[in-house]
Amino acid sequence: MASAGSSLFPVNFSSIVCSGTKSFPGSSSNNSIPISVPVSFSTHRLSVSTTEDQSSEAKTKILEKRNLKNSVEEEESAHTTSFSREEGFWSHAELNEVDQIKERRTSVKDYFEQAKDWIRSDCGPPRWFSPLECGSRLNDSPLLLFLPGIDGVGLGLVKHHEKLGKIFDIWCLHIPVEDRTSFVELVKLVERTIRPEHDRSPNRPIYLVGENIGACLALSVAALNPDIDLVLILANPATSFSKSQIQFLTPLLEVMPESLQLSLPYMLSLVTGDPLNMIKASFEKGLPLQMIGELTRGVNEMSSYLPVLADILPRDTLLWKLQMLRSASAFANSRLHAVKAETLILCSGKDLLLPSKEEGERLYQILPNSRIRNFEESGHFILMEDETDVVTIIKGSIFYRRSKNHDYVSDFIPPTPYEFRKMVESNQWINVAASPVMFSTLDDGKIVRSLAGIPSEGPVLFVGYHMLLGLELAPFVSQLLIERNILVRGIAHPMMFMKVAKGSLPEYPHFESMRIMGAVPVSAMNFYKLFSSKSHVLLYPGGMREALHRKGEEYKLFWPEQSEFVRMAARFGAKIVPFGVVGEDDIGELFFDYEDQMKIPYLRAQIEELTNQVAKLRNNATGEVANQQVHLPGILPKIPGRFYYYFGKPIETEGRKKELKDREKSHELYLHVKSEVERCIGYLKEKREKDPYRNLLPRLVYQATHGFTTEVPTFEI
């Protein structure tokens, strides 16, 4: 994982490649297969036969080899197991540009181009293939098996292969066009694959990613193998086939003359998505007009792939697949009660093939260990759409692990520039409206308008005041990463990570962003692991009580009476950085708080229900800090003022481990940190009165005359 004190986005990522041998799923460790490992993503065509009489021998053949000239140089760094970090880093603008280029590498066109290669000489039984002959995987990366949908090609994750290949060992199932293997036999095939993998690494999960039929396949395998640690990711599962309109296509196909075809343009639109939505999304991304023009031409070029689609799903094959959909749906539905695997359900709101949104909610209620993600604007083939990023979804849902239990520290994957940019964009309104100003304190006590006073090397513990609804969090996290290239790991309420009952606590997008940025549930073990990894850690001792305070309580600290963090910080010699932040009273007025809501019977019942659902913290605490009822306060917006942050001088605990084991000494330091936070708040409240640009209008006038990207001045330090 990333040490938060070092450069998160380095100048160069070291090449990380596989070397020596590679085994296909289902083969024993003694039957590892020597293969050539070219670097180029285009050289991905490794095919492995999986017929029952061949699986033990793990026979392989290379179908295609191209672009090998760089393989020698890449193999020299094959021993590298993680991203290297060097001094210095790129500007985030440069990283965004590079990341956008990477995001555009694959598209639906790539799916059809590669599908043509498969169906040109397609024969034989279903088989596994690796889409990446050379992956840059992390140590102990879990196996990911992709189970295809109705097309059977196995390229449904083509847009995600490169990113997935950095954290998984990916194998995809290919079902030839003319193959007529029954659904039950496909279930057995997957079982024969995962069983030896589980026996070889019993503590490592196996991921099954399936769309429509493939999702039924994943559910069936999980139901029949409850002893194997499986993680399921289901995209628009076909368990709703009996409720869909496509079930009526079977009798139509049976009587339709072979010379007639179904509406292929319609089917193609299901794969590519709505062209107007694609172009609209491009405008929202701020892509240049030239690129949008290319996208428009690309959508028009999709019609040239109609013959490919016809070859993938000819009449007889489509009829067979529809019949398989019926049997797959019935098979999986009859066994849902036996599925105990961790499951992530991806549902499209505009699925024209299946009632996926309703089915997702049904499965969410049936499967005990499941989470659901709804994509309101997506069509059936959600994995092929531009706005879908499978790796980001997995990270945001806390679904990546390399052992039996998820470890929030060792399993953490740092955010990519693309993910970070999305987080900044989603919170851009705060930066525009509140124009945050940040001050820090250098070692000599000098206050500067920058984050230069933040220690570069961890472990570091930020301790401060939690504004109403935590509005200060996003600007601080993003500015620290942009200015100092330091990723701060927030200690968060368990509510951000839990599954809740339908119709109660919603999945806020803000929660997902914070999980991607590295937030962890509050616990002594997570504290220990973060400090052990020399991370920069963010703690709000006032927690939910501060963030959901009542009227008239702004800038009041609600800290526990006993010290909670001092001795842990001293154990690792962490620097404690106290900070204050003000400005919530300049952007809104709290007019409907907890006390008001408890007077209304309906709202009181809702608050009690939500509070009972979330994990209880500080059960032994007394006073207001223990009063952490879950509710949403009503805020009346104001013409925006400004946010101010002040980070005090770091407090050293290095060498004080023995001293601070004494409860009285540690409590003295705890009270000192609290008083420093209060001092920082008082300093900002006083100084902001002298800021000529505290209000929005003067800031807009200044930016109109000096440029809207110009830093707006503030009070004199």
Image (cartoon, grey):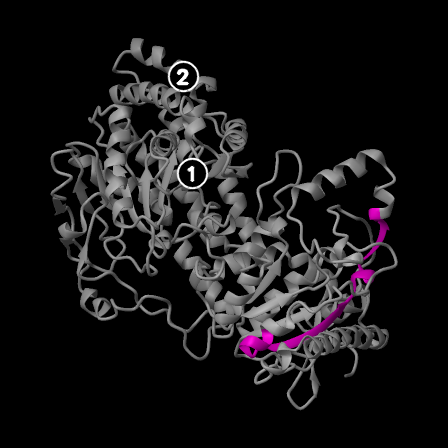
As drawn, is 94 to the left or to the right of 592? left
Q: Position of residue 89 (x, y in %)?
A: 46, 75
Task: Say which residue appears at 70% left-offset and 64% top-offset.
Answer: 541
Image quarter where the C terminus lies is bottom right
Front-most of residues 144 and 626: 626
User: Is residue 277 depicted above or below 710 in this figure?
Assistant: above
As drawn, is 114 to the left or to the right of 455? left
User: Is residue 595 depicted above or below 176 in this figure?
Assistant: below
Which is in the foreground here, disc 1 or disc 2? 1
Q: Residue furthest top?
A: 255
Task: Say which residue appears at 45% left-offset and 39% top-offset.
Answer: 343
Q: Position of residue 74 (x, y in %)?
A: 24, 67
Pointer 1 residue: 341
Whichever of labels 1 and 2 marks the residue nearer the N terminus, that label is 2
- Visible residue check, residue 468: no
User: Is residue 519 depicted above or below 222 in this figure?
Assistant: below
Task: Say which residue appears at 20% left-offset and 59% top-offset.
Answer: 38
Q: Amino acid at mark 1?
A: Ala
Q: Position of residue 172 (x, y in %)?
A: 28, 42
Which quadrant of the view contains residue 646?
A: bottom right
Q: Is residue 665 magenta?
A: no
How dense is the environment of label 2, judged by Cα within 10 Å: few (below 14), some, or many (20 and up)?
Answer: some
Q: Amino acid at mark 2?
A: Gln
Front-most of residues 593 and 659: 659
Say which mark, if any, is on residue 247. Answer: 2
| Span shown in magenta | 569-594
Q: Position of residue 601 (x, y in %)?
A: 84, 34
